Image (cartoon, rainbow, N blue to C red):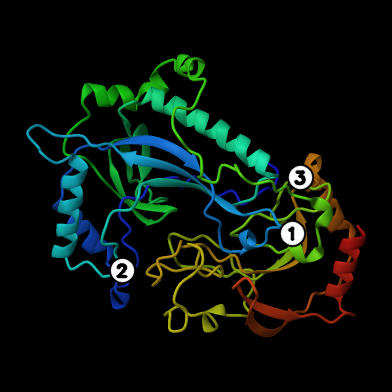
Amino acid sequence: DYSGKMPYIDSSHTELLRIGSLDVDKGGTTIEQVYEAMSSVTFAPFSIYPEYLKGGGGHHSGDNEDQQKVPSSDVTLIVSVVDTYEDGDSYSSYEIFLNNLFSAMQAVNGGSCMDDHDTDPHVSMARGVKFKSAYHQEQYMYSANLEVAVWQAMYPKGTPIGSKGYASFPPGSRGNKQYVGYGNLYFFFDRANITKAFRPYRDLTDDEAAYATLYTSSDVSSYYANTNEIGFDYSGSGDGGGGNWEHNPYSWKATMAMHDMTDGWDLPPNCEQEGETFFGIPLSRKSDSSLQVSTSFQEQFNFEHIIDRNYTYIKSFGTNHGWLVGEQIGNGAGSIVDKDTAHIPIFYIGTTNPNMGGISLSNLIKVGKRIEFGTLYIKPAFVFIDDNGHIKLQFEMDPNSALAYLYDNLCKE
């Protein structure tokens, strides 16, 4: 596989209620409180209806403030929970569930970090996307929403979400695989880790089961053949209309080569794809967490002494990733529990797809083997916050050192 963006697991979901922090000392709610509250709540299977795909929203780099740059935007699928009614009920199943859920959370003394209303249902597809031009963005939005129109034709009354597969809760736990089924709700420790499934009190009706299994058990080609237009309004949602911008690779400058995990890159001439490949020095250390897997590459620096685990100084992060040198369970901000990926990047290569302006992995290995260099010495200089709000530990490099020699030869190769 070519190195494009980092290959994260599929963590697509729609959020119904944000619990927030799990640290009770900071206004959070513990997992045990959530489980206790949910044990007293029953619900019928919910059906989800796809509304439309939208862009816009921007992200954290400030790119949208500069009209000469390609704007950065998010891609989001807007969905809704269908109002269904059980026998004799005056309120929809979802309304009853929300009322009961908030009452149950209050009964277990849920923390103040929890939202006081349900989340507008949506599926975050991508963040910090940069299109080639306003025209390309407009064409993408049309193509994607035409697919949504097909889904609407397939599921005019929405569909329960689920599958016939099996999964472990929490992920990676052995001997704990459960049947997934349909219509469940799940507790997300973070978007990458589901720790518990909550099942509806009844099975699917015949109609619900028909919709839930339509895509896998039927020939749906007729829905595609008969859907030739979009019957809903998605204009004004970052579809590219009204803009006339275009990425100009020949205006690229070296200062644009910022490795920003929250936004797409501005690419130089003849480069058609982002990539994560680089030569560097790993500084990660082994973690005891069952949700993290990392290897000890160094025993010289303990970054625990220079990061703010207790949130004494830091209020929040700009993304749902916290400390990239390794997060821990119970972190106050409830960030994704990433493994320790601490490193010193020396030379960024980008994509390994030669057809998109990159260098193949086999050739990179040959380059690495060809260069002979001495022992690499590094010296920590200072911690600082750059113009993008990133906390970094700066290292010094002697221009006459083996590290400088290595960098120079990588450039030449």
Above or below — where is 337 with respect to 223? below
Q: Quadrant of the N terminus?
A: top right
Q: Which mark is residue 113?
A: 2
Dividing the picture into quadrants, the one containing residue 32 is: bottom left
Q: Secondary structure at mark 2?
A: loop
Dividing the picture into quadrants, the one containing residue 242 is: top right
Evaluate whether residue 27 shows in this view: yes
Above or below — where is 341 with respect to 396? above
Residue that appears at 75% across and 62% down: 257
Q: Are the residues tagged 1 and 2 within 8 Å (C-beta)?
A: no
Residue that appears at 76% across and 43% down: 353
At label 1, the amino acid type is Phe
Q: Which mark is residue 272?
A: 3
**Label 1 Cα neighbours within 10 Å, binned few <14 / some 14-19 / many ≥20:** some
Q: Secondary structure at mark 3?
A: loop
Residue that appears at 62% across and 77% down: 299
Task: Identify residue for label 1.
Answer: 278
Question: In the image shown, does 141 or 244 lie closer to the viewer?
Answer: 244
Q: Which mark is residue 45?
A: none
Q: Give how far apart the Cα atoms at labels 1 and 3 are.
A: 17 Å
Question: In the image shown, does 200 or 154 lie closer to the viewer?
Answer: 154
Percent across and percent down for residue 158 are 32, 31
